Image (spheres, helix red, strand yellow):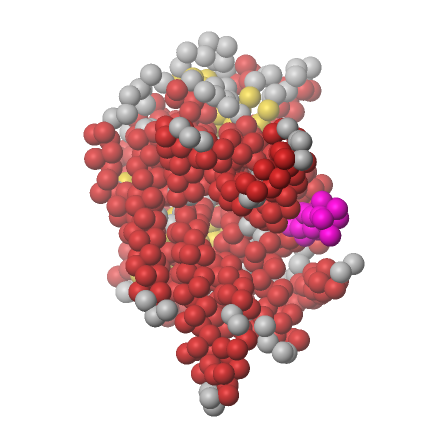
Amino acid sequence: MRGFDVRIVIESLPLLLRGALITIQVSALGLLLAALIAVPVAFARLSRSRILRTTTFLYLDFVRGTPLLLQLFAIFYLPPLLGIDLSPFASGVIALGLNGGAYTAEILRGGIQALPRGQTESARALGMSALQSARRIVLPQVVANVLPALANESAALIKASSLVSALALVELTRVGYQVVSRILRPMEIYVTVGALYLLINAAVSSGAALAHRRLAAYR
Amino acid sequence: MQFDWSIVARYGGSFVDGAVMTLVVSVAATLIGLVIGMLAALARLSPWVFLRGVARAYVEIIRGTPLLVQLFFLYAALPLYGIRLSAVASGIVALSLYTGAFAAEILRAGITAVQRGHVEAARSLGMSYGQAMRRIVMPLMAVQVLPPLTSEFTGVIKWSSLLSVVTVPELTYTAYRAIGETYSAVEPLVVAGLLYWGLNDLVVAVGRGLERRLTRHLA
Amino acid sequence: MTRTLRVKTRTAIALLVALATVGLIAPDSRAGLLDDIKKKKEIVIATEAGYAPFEYVENGKIVGYHADLLALVMKDLTDQGVKVNQLDLPFASLLAGLQAKKYDMIATALFGTEERAKRFAFTIPTAFGTTGIVTKADNAAITKPDDLDGKTVGAPQATKYLDQMKALSEEFKKKGGKGIKEIKEYASGFTEIYADIDNGRIDAAPNGMPNLAVLMKQQPGKYKLAGQVGDPTYFAWATRKEDTDLLEYLNSQMLKLKKAGTFAELQKKWFGFTMDLPDVPTLMK
């Protein structure tokens, strides 16, 4: 029976932290892409154009109905057929962005639909264009309202970044796996890896809580 | 480069086997996860601080760390302490624990949502506590938690794709094997993707059907 | 059927029809991969860096026999300013990725088999790869390959080792035995396989003799060898069939290094012995 050897944790920490940095990079870029995709898709899903509604529906349904791991493989192995070559890092960011974007779009859509119509109506009555009312009236309120769900989604994305290890990207999980392959102490290493993920998530959720309080100050 | 239908023909049977394994693993994990979740939910609502603390720790840790890391941990670390599970068993255990943590929160919300008033009213009508739970609280709770639980199940189906990493022969594993043997990534990924999408639709349809039947007497 | 289901089914069918016909996206005819590489100033190489002593990761870098060899073979190109971009990817889809043009070549411990040679081209052999059987040190029941009858073995997906185990099982059955009880296919690589031998999930596994030698050194006392399987086999690197200019470059560089004795030097360094290798691509069945 082996005990928990803290020295192993300390020795592997530098290597693991380097992996954590890659995790943060992939996740941050993935979240950014997800946000950029989610907003137009959420509005498109509610648009009057049937084509727009159907195409976005198919995108959302497919991405939310199939495993992220499969989407990751597809993005890595399929684009070369069209002449585009993506690195494991880029594939990871795009897969996380498309996937996270789909879930975020649905969260936003729910928030938009929950907003009283009076908001949009008065904005338009004041002379704002659709784009202006979306940007200055609807979106800020929706985001403030669904912030907890968005924070949840961000945490999910950070955890999902561990899947990019399947393409051998050297983020936190992959580094953990490599270290365990070498020194054969899965207990110490995976517990440390888990703890690091918890730390990253805690940092993000306290950031979100801070944002929530500042946004709520408007009410 | 053409879409090679012969690959679909040759591996069709294996893909079906993979899909069956995916379903089996997902059903097992969802059911066991439900039990774990219920226990954890009740523990969090119990009057004993220790029980509440343990349940809270379980939920926070499992929900805050990636499933992949938990999977690696269970697969590699447990044998060192004498617990040697087969790949499929480790996969089901990991998935059950993972989904159980999320189910715990859903169920906890469901239980607290059903007002005490219902229980008191039922008791005043002469029902025992057990009868009140069974005929009033549980059905009301079922309606409340069925939608989130259906999406939990579809989530499990997608998360089951990670089990491919620890040699469980489910759908993603089969796709990966086909890619390795045929040197072509397109066909296996497309087939696997469509199969997952179809499974997802099936589950959603069944969930909606269940929902309608359960709420018939309430309409 | 509900409306959404109808829409989705129609889309799925449309997607399949499109795929069946779209294969007509022809890649532009190229002057030659090598020229492209020199123009782009980058060569992308795929490796599975989980295979000591050929290629493995140490402190974040890919090292090993093939890593050293690659640096020397690429020297002429790197001197011209070409950057070597080495990707570390899972083995099972390495060849699929090469086919899909995700990278220019594969430099990893890869068996040149006749089956693979139908789609890809191989360089001259870089090393010996005869397959040995490894099992737990205290496993008295398995001392030679024939003892695998009725046992459980593991091998990585899409490898020649896997094929060898399947063939071995067939042989057992033909001779009246039970065949190998179960052949587990691993998506992840030898780390899991060795660990599973240690904890008893599988009884034995095949791997190249040089790799097993390293395993014995790194983890003394835990495992033991149980004989060899099959004919002597060779590792080589691979390119797509049409990229003959790149293949020529690789082979000519390797032959140059061989003549200069560098091959022998590297082999001594990483394996502890030198190997007698053919000067032409040599395939195995």
Tell me: B99 left or right of C257. Answer: right
Percent across and percent down for residue C163 are: 58, 33
Above or below, A29 against B180 in this view is below
Q: Give the residue at x 51% y 65%.
A: A111
Q: Is residue B110 visible?
A: no
Percent across and percent down for residue B184 are: 59, 52
Q: Is residue A39 visible?
A: yes
B203 in magenta: yes
Specify start and end residues of the magenta stretch as a single range.
Answer: B200-219
Above or below, B71 against C138 in this view is below
Tell me: A37 left or right of A5. Answer: right
A25 in magenta: no
The N terminus of chain B, quarter of image? bottom right
Q: Give the residue at x 46% y 74%.
A: A138
View extreme (bottom): residue: A127
View extreme (right): residue: C1
Q: Give the residue at x 34% y 29%.
A: A187
Q: Residue C285: which quarter of the image?
A: top right
Percent across and percent down for residue B80 are: 39, 21
Q: Nearer the viewer, residue B210 or B139?
A: B139
Percent across and percent down for residue C17 are: 72, 64
Above or below, C174 against B6 in this view is above
